[in-house]
Amino acid sequence: MVTGALGGMGSAICEALDANGWIVAGLDRPDVVESPTDQAFPGFVLGADITSTPDLESAFTEVARRAGTPTALVNCAGVSMDEQLVHMSIDHLRNAIEVNLVAAIAAMSLFARSWIARGTEDRVTDGAAIVNICSLSAYGANPGQSAYASSKAGLVAATRVAAHELGPLGVRVNAILPSFVSTPLTAGAGEDVRESLLARTPLGRFPDRDEVAATVTWLLSPEASYVSGAELRVSGGRLF
């Protein structure tokens, strides 16, 4: 299951997972999902407001009906809404926290419950994994990012807690902290912002979406079978 599946980063992740043999179930906002058959999507996609508990629960039920109990979850849905404190819309603040943090934690909770329902023997044999798409902003102090940075820092913390709680159930949980990636979410960033970030990136370039997607695929694979609770920077050497 991949939330934010039709976004710039989400679509790259879904394509990479499909190429590696996964059955991909995507979730995205109902207003951007015309129908599962109309989308050029590697798998099937469901319209769901992930900030709505009934919508999220229904999505998990439908995925299980179509493809069985999910064995991997990628929390990729996100919103930015950068605003400095003196001009901040409190509604925008609440929405950013709801989408970036609350919905991701809720999805992990529902995933864990569905995983437990598989039974002990299956859990031990198969294993499962969660990857949360966070951001280097979780450790930064970029002006205007009170909501975004706080939500991503919270998701990093939630990743650690989930890895601790779910490890005994055979579920690995990791976070990816990408550098600036060109997607619709970052389209509004000015050239000055891009130049500043690039100047602090030792590799001298921004990552391609496919490079981030490949990292997700690796974390969900057997090759990363002993990696859990990690905060993996995909940043070209930029730390913050």
Image: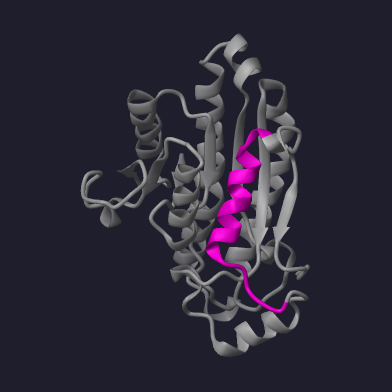
User: From the viewer's perspective, is 25 left or right of 222?
Assistant: left
Magenta stretch: residue 21 in it? no
- Image quadrant where residue 137 sits: bottom right
- In the rendered image, the vertical position of residue 93 relative to residue 198, given as above or below: above
What residue sits 72% from the left and 73% below the top?
141
Counting the numbered discs, the total is 0
Residue 162 appears in the picture as rendered: no
x and y percentages locating residue 85 in the rendered image = 59, 76
Q: Which residue occupies the foreground of this view, 95 or 86?
A: 95
Q: Residue at x 46, y 39 (%)?
A: 1
Q: Is residue 211 above or below residue 161?
A: below
Please name the residue shown 56% across and 11% down the image.
119
Name the spot of residue 35 as percent of width and height, x first.
22, 47
- Characterize the magenta stretch by its predominant secondary structure: helix
Q: Is residue 121 above or below residue 112?
A: above
Quadrant occupied by the C terminus? bottom right
Q: Kindly identify the residue that appears in the image at 66 percent across and 77 percent down.
A: 205
Residue sticking out furthest to the bottom: 192
Q: Tell me which segment is drawn in magenta.
A: 204-222
